[in-house]
Image (cartoon, coloured by chain):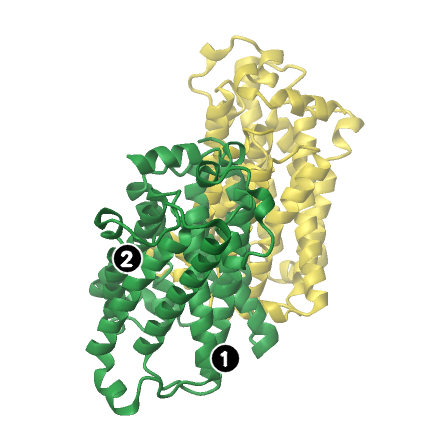
Chain colours: A green, B yellow
Amino acid sequence: MEYRKIKDQDEDEESAGDLELSRGKPNSAGMMNNVAALGALSGVAPQWKRKSMVTLALTILTSSQAILIVWSKRAGKYDYSVTTANFLVETLKCALSLLALAKIWRTEGVTDDNRLSTTVDEVIVYPIPAVLYLVKNLLQYYIFAYVDAPGYQILKNLNIISTGVLYRIILKKRLSDIEWAAFILLCAGCTTAQLTSNSDHVLQTPLYGWVMAIVMALLSGFAGVYTEAIIKKRPQRNINVQNFYLYVFGMIFNAIAIVIQDFDEVANKGFFHGYSFITVLMIVNHALSGIAVSMVMKYADNIVKVYSTSVAMLLTAIVSVFLFGFHLSLAFFLGATVVSVSVYLQKFGKTPR
Amino acid sequence: MEYRKIKDQDEDEESAGDLELSRGKPNSAGMMNNVAALGALSGVAPQWKRKSMVTLALTILTSSQAILIVWSKRAGKYDYSVTTANFLVETLKCALSLLALAKIWRTEGVTDDNRLSTTVDEVIVYPIPAVLYLVKNLLQYYIFAYVDAPGYQILKNLNIISTGVLYRIILKKRLSDIEWAAFILLCAGCTTAQLTSNSDHVLQTPLYGWVMAIVMALLSGFAGVYTEAIIKKRPQRNINVQNFYLYVFGMIFNAIAIVIQDFDEVANKGFFHGYSFITVLMIVNHALSGIAVSMVMKYADNIVKVYSTSVAMLLTAIVSVFLFGFHLSLAFFLGATVVSVSVYLQKFGKTPR
C-alpha cells in the first residue's frame, strides 16, 4: 500500500523531484563535492542524472563481466571453487557498502535513514532474494541434463518476459501497450542476436526442460522484482544500508553453498585454491555490478535493469570483435537492430499511461 | 501538386468518406448487389471495408502464389519460357479489367470516370512502371553472379526499406517515428524469419553485389511508389481503366522480353511449350494478385502492400508445414514475432502525425 503510493508519485519524477531527498536533507545540493562515487550516487544528484549514471555503470560492468569470462576461458579452464568466489563477491559488496556508509556518516552524521540498526519488520524480507537465487543456482545444475549450454543461453531470455510479467503483477505497475511491445521485441531481439547454426536444437527441448527453464526464469524474475519491492518500500532509507542487509544474507547463503557443494575441496586444497589475477578481477567486477544492480533497483526499476543488461550483451559481442577477433553473424545484426528499436520505442511508451 | 492536395484530404478518410465516390456517383450504396467482385471493389463499399478486403485478398493471393511455386518445384522443374508466362499474366489482367469495366458500363453507364478513351497527358506515365520492372528483371539475371539464391531472398528485404524511403520522398507522405520503427522491424523480422544456417554468406557479398541489390531494391520500390502516384493522381478515375492502361504497357514490354530472351525457344517449340495445369494455376494466381496490388495502391498504399506481402511470407511458411511437412526454425518464430509486433505498432503509428 505504502509502496503503491510511492510509485504513483514517482510517475512524474521529473517535476516532483527526489522523494527521498526532499524528505531527509533538503537544499543539500551544495554539499556534493568529494564524496566517493558510491556516496555520490546515493547522495544529491538529480534523479534523472543518477538514474542515467547507475544504468550506464550497470551496462558497462555487465558487458566487461562477460568479456572477463571469455578472457578467463581463453586463459585456460579455471579450477577454483565457484561457491568461494560467490561468497567473496558478497563479502566485497558488503565491505563496499559499509565503506560508503562510513563516508556518509562522517559528512552527514548518523540519521534515521542511514543508521545500521534496524527492526525485525524491516530486515525480515532481506533473506528472501538470497534464498531465491540459491534455489535458482541449484536448479541450474539440473537443467543441463535437458538443454545444452548454448540452448540454455537462449532459454535465459525468458527472464526478460518473466521480469515484465512479475513487475506488472507484484509491483502493480502498469506497462503501456508500446512498452509491452518493446519488451517482447527486446526478448526476440536478444534471442535472435544469440542464434547460431545449432540454435534449432532448443526446439527439441523436452517438456521437462521447458518447465525448468520457465521456473528458473520466474525465480530469477521474482528475485529481481522482489528486491526492487524491498528497496523501494522504504525510499527514504539509504541504499547502502539496504545493500548491506541484502549482501549479509547473500554471504550467509553462499557460505551454506560452500559447505554443501565444495566442503571437501576447500578443506583439502584451501579456500583460495586455483585463484589467479583474472579471478580477482572477475570478483571485483561482479561485486561492482551487483551494487550497480541495487542502485538501478533504487533509482530506476527492473525494466531499466533488463534493458541495461541486454544492451550490455550486444556491447560485449561488439567489443569481442576487436579484442578476440570474433565474427558477428547476420543474426547478430538483425537482433541488435530489433533491440535498438525496442530501446527507441521506450521513448513513446510512457506517453499514453 | 494536385496529388498532394488529395493526399491531405485522404488523411482523415474515415470521416471525410470516399473522395472518388462522393464526386462521381453519390448515394449509390443501394446499387451494390450482384456486381462481380472486381466491380464491387471499385464500387461503393465503405473505404475502410474495401481497404481491408483488397489487403486480405493480396495477402492470401501472395501467400498461395509462393505455395504454388513450392508445389511446382516439387512436381519437377518447369521448362516453359518464363517470359511467355509473364506475357499471359499481363494479358489476363488486361482481360479481367475489361470484363469488370463492361459490367460497370452495363450497370452504371459510361461516364467521364469509367470511359476508356484518354488523353496523352493521362496515358504518358503508364509505361514507366512497366519499363522499371523490365529493367529490374534483367538485372536479376546478373545479380546471381555475386549472390546465391537464398542470399538474394534475404537481400530482397531491402525492398521494404527502399519502399518506405521512396514513399516518403516521392509521395511526400510523412511516416511517424513509430511507423518508421515498425518498418525497420518489418525488414529485420522478415529477414530473421528467412535465416538459415548458410545465411551468413550474405555478409561476404562483394561490394558490387550490394550495389546491385540496392539498385534493384530502389527500382522495385520506385516502380511501386510511382504506380501509386499514377493511380492516386486521378482518384475519381475508375481503377479498372487505370489497370487496363497499366497492363496494356505490361503486355507490350513483356512481348519485347519474349523477343529478346526466348525468341528461338518459342519459334521452335511453340508459345505454350512446357505448360502444365500448375503453370496455368500460377498464371491465374499471378494475374489476380497483380490486380490486388493495384487495388491496394488505389484504396490503401505501398506501406499496406509491403505489410501484406510480408505477412503472406509468414503465412506461406506456416501453411507449408501442413502441406509439405516443412520444419519451422527458431529464427522463423523470432522473425514472425518481430513482424507481428511491427504490424501491432501500426495501431499507434497514426496518432502523432
Give x and y (percent) for residue A55: 51, 54
Q: Amino acid at mark 2?
A: Pro
Residue under pointer 1: A71
Same chain for mark 1 and mark 2? The answer is yes
User: How many numbered callouts?
Assistant: 2
Label annotation for residue A129: 2
Viewer-closest of A130 and B189: A130
Q: Are marks 1 and 2 in contact (CB under 8 Å)?
A: no
Q: Chain of mark 1?
A: A
Point 37% across, 54% down: residue: A241
Name the foreground residue: B223 vs B76: B223
Q: Earlier in the sequence, mark 1 or mark 2?
A: 1
Give the x, y percent position of residue A103. Answer: 48, 58
Report whether residue A329 is seen: no
Crowd class of label 2 (few under 14; some 14 to 19; many from 20; radius 10 Å): many
Residue in the picture at 31% in, 48% down: A230
Label 1: few (<14), some or many (≥20) within 10 Å?
A: some
Q: SS of the residue at dot 2?
A: helix
One can see residue B116 in this view: yes
Coordinates of residue A204 in the picture (x, y in percent) = 29, 67
Q: Residue furthest bottom?
A: A268
Quarter where residue A167 is shown: top left
Residue A293, position as x, y percentages in the image = 42, 57
C-alpha separation, residue under disc 1 versus residue under disc 2: 30 Å
Quarter of the rendering occupied by the N terminus of chain A = top left
